[in-house]
Amino acid sequence: MRPDADRLIDYERLVAPREDGGLLLEPAPARWRWLSEPPSSYADAWLGGASIGDLRRAWRERLGLRSPVIIAGHQPEFFHAGVLAKNLAAAALVARVGGTAVFLTVDTDVPKTAHLRVPQATAGGLRALDLPIPGADSQRSYTDQPPATSDRWLGLFAQAGAALSAHGETLLPTFARAWLAGAPPQVGYVDAFDRARRASERAAGIEPLVEVRVSELAAGPEFGAFVAALLADAPRFAHEYNTALESYRRRHRVSAPGRPVPPLASLGDRVEAPLWISRRGGPRRRMFVRRGATDVEVYCEEEPAFRIGLTALASNAAWPPPEPWRVWPRALTLSALVRLLLADLFIHGIGGARYDEMTEAFAGSFFAVELAPMACVSATLRLPLPRSRLGIGDWLAARHAARDVRHNPQRHLAQAPPELLAARAEWVRRSEELRRAPRSRSARVERAAIFSEIRRVNARLLEVEPWLAARYDQRVEAIAAALAQDRIALDREYFYGLHRVADVRELSALIHEQLVALSPGAARSGAS
């Protein structure tokens, strides 16, 4: 029997590994043998006119997925090795227990950046290049990104490769060749991303994950049944969602507005649903709904979009929406959808795993079932770049010394005139006497005059070695510059394709070694 799901994830452990090659697997690998066993309540839980168990079986059959279904995924961006670790874990687990490892391509999201950051070692030190991504449009979803010419993509990969000292040892040539493989003059972004991802996974020594795109899931009847349940009872769903959000914020002492997500709002008699709505090819907008006596009216923010009859909602016959409208899940809704209707195990990164504490609360309450379990996988890989052995403590110590040389130069001078040292000591003694004396206005005035005399003597002492303070200042500046270089060198967010193949394979082997102790008995046959 699977342990209580609430105790599977230790949220305090969801922190990115600091060390190079560090790996985060949560829960501990020994407990993963329970994670591909979905809750047993799905056969008796219903969405509209179908049971959740039937919807799960139908969706898997249509997508050609064998159980257990282990799902990782991400936006189709140039993500870092910590994200790739989720794919490596999914492949390792499926190799051990059977089933299908899926990469869920979140092509309904919009790009967070229009640049690919690449570090470059120069004679003057490290610098970070922000190379423009061809055609990147932050107002359009990935699936609607305008195609760019293969020459422009070739230029991006050539620039990135030229910045790397060991370009031929990295995954970048494999990634770039697959991105451009058989490409016409115009390269479609999501298709190219999937080719390159699969080629990179082969190079890393794993069986490539099966791709499933969110845009395709959102066009299917199973997603329609999920949306129908939300729209038919939108006020209650918004209440459960906002209650879970407030509980999460209190529990984790989150005070920043809109964190981790904004609450669902109301506009008069309309209530917000956690879904995106857009015209085909247009920007995403928030969805609002208003329930009438016989139908639900759907709004694209304040613009009326379409109506759905309550009878159609109840019978799961209301999907897909009429042209030109598209409906897509937002982040937490997507996680709830996949864990409810598709996955046996959903592998999150750190951020997603933290926020799914909230997902489990609102989805479990609204649907009255337990979601399929999740795990969290991440890793830290550093690029082989020059770095110092300095830390923030060194900078703080140097800054303290630079301040101290001005306030206490006698501590730092090799030799100092005895008369100046004696004068300083006398002024300090008199200041201490006044500090211990009863407080009065005259004492404050006298002590301020003494401080002025101490500063004057300090200045004369520093004239003995006029470059002393400057040397201390230069030490502070040098350490600050070294730390700035280290921030470039130690960044764990660099695109995984910039890493050496050998390093990615080593990470893959480490993940496989951690998960290999799982019992083969965890594998199941048939769909759930």
Image (cartoon, grey):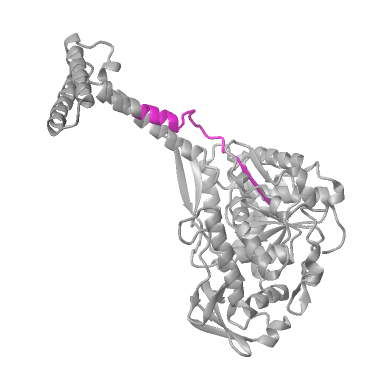
Look at the image and say whether residue 376 sits in the magenta stretch.
yes
Q: Is residue 73 left or right of residue 112?
A: right
> Residue 225, percent across and down?
70, 76
Q: Residue at x 68, y 65 (%)?
A: 364
Taking 210 as reference, is 201 above or below it?
above
Magenta highlight range: 374-399
On the image, the x and y values in percent for residue 131 come to 48, 51
Give how far across and how far down residue 389 sits, in percent.
49, 28
- Can residue 463 be seen here? no
Q: Residue furthest front?
A: 438
User: What's the residue at 22%, 26% (across, down)?
Assistant: 435
Q: Is residue 9 magenta?
A: no
Pick the front one: 339 or 422: 422
Q: Is residue 499 left or right of residue 397?
A: right
- Viewer-closest of 442 and 209: 442
The percent position of residue 130, horizontal first and vertical second, equals 46, 49
